[in-house]
Amino acid sequence: MGYAALVVATSTRFRADNGPIISYGNDWFRLAIVCIVCMLCMYYYDLYASIFISGTRALPWIVAQVVGTTCIVLGTLYYFCPSLAIRISLFVPGVVFMGCCLLVWRALFSALNGSRRFMARTVILGGGPLALPIAVEIESRPELGCQLVGFVAEAPESPAGLNGFRCIGDIRELPKIMDKEKVNRIIITMGDRRGTLPLEELLELKAHGVTINDGIDFYEAATCKMYLGSPVLSQLLFSKGFRVSRIMLVFKHVFSFLFSLVLLILAIPLMGLVAVGIWLDSGWPILFRQKRVGKDGRVFTLFKFRSMKLAGNVNGRGNGEPQPTQLNDVRFTSVGRWIRRLRVDELPQLYNILRGDMDFVGPRPFMLEEEHELARQIPYYKQRWTVRPGATGWAQVHRAYCATLEDNIDKLSYDLFYIKNMSIGLDLLIVFQTVKVLLCGRGAR
């Protein structure tokens, strides 16, 4: 869309000179740079997030910010690399036209995406524990392209558990319901399928073009996390995931080692400045050491820059009992508050990655006491320990700090999703999203 807008702007500007390609010297590369910068700015401002895919009143303001930031970034780039610059007579109308096209295209897409005419009429087969979370996702997220018709539940399953969503019939009436409601998609959420699932009817419907989805697979695709309700054991045992190849593990270890080594070398000057700042602000020690749980439950020492005062125990309340960090925590030093906000206090963890305690990407390791307490309270929590912990991870880019047991359960659902679907592509996506989180300063505490 952006490239087409620039080409149209070029054609309009140079229509008297036999077309934009001849008059502009066949230089598509410089136009491509404008588009790449614009796409990165769109990603930075969350224009690819579902809230903006669905449409929002703030869209014009966000698009204006994208266009303004694009101009600033390109202006800086052109200052240092004048050879990449395009003519001002093309740049101004091209970027303005691109912003207008983006606004119109997003409005058109939002209208089409939100139209019930183009949505798949969907029924949820079963009233088990997973049924309600899926219904809530469908109702709150039109970008999924589903219109919930209602539930088709067994007689023993109480419609009261469906929280007001419509129960449109019994499973034995499924063929009649499909014809009457013109259903295009069925999501199966039955808790115990043995002897109750109408296999022949479902196969016939599938042969006639009806999409059949497993509830757990649909939930994971929609939320990017695992469902941890009952029956979670079956998906842990029989799912296609949780089989990480040896090649993948070797790649992760080599990538983590090389990437952390490069970053550590580049960060040495900054780390030196931070160390001097901590020493001048609050004295020794410079580093903060804490026991964390690693792969297979092995305990290791995690290193960070110290960001809290020396009074009592810097690890907790002063009596040896750990205390989670709070917003505007009074224990922060003047320098510590800034290095935590900028995430600079995490840089010594590169040494942990170099010596094999951690990978660059993986579940975030918690304090030893907190980790064992959560393992005692949350089923399947120890599954996090089957891989090396990471400096960043799938849960870190989707969630902020955890304050309650429910927060940690939700965070575990993201960690298990990562372990189940671990791949090179997912690791690279997490690294890319981590850069965005750092630039936006989100989740720092």
Image (spheres, helix red, strand yellow):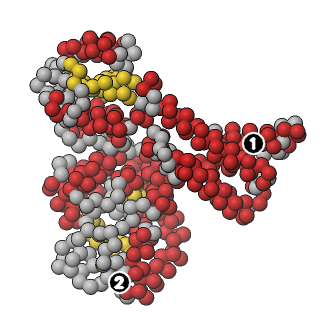
Residue 116 visible at all: yes
Comparing 214 with 367, the one in front is 214
Mark on residue 9? 1
Q: Quadrant of residue 217?
A: top left
- Left or right side of 31 for 322: left
- Label 2 sits on residue: 285
- Left or right side of 4 for 264: left
Q: Who's the residue at 27% across and 25% down the image?
A: 150
Q: Position of residue 134 (x, y in %)?
A: 29, 35
Q: Nearer the viewer, mark 2 or mark 1?
A: 1
Q: Who's the residue at 36% across and 67% down the image?
A: 445
Q: Who's the residue at 50% across and 80% down the image?
A: 273
Q: Position of residue 24 (x, y in %)?
A: 82, 45
Comparing 193 with 75, the one in front is 75
Residue 77 visible at all: no
Q: Who's the residue at 77% across and 49% down the image?
A: 90
Identify whether 174 is placed above or below 394.
above
Mark on residue 147? none
Tell me the kind of residue under disc 2.
Answer: Pro
Dot 2 crowding, Cα within 10 Å, few <14, some 14–19, many 20+: few
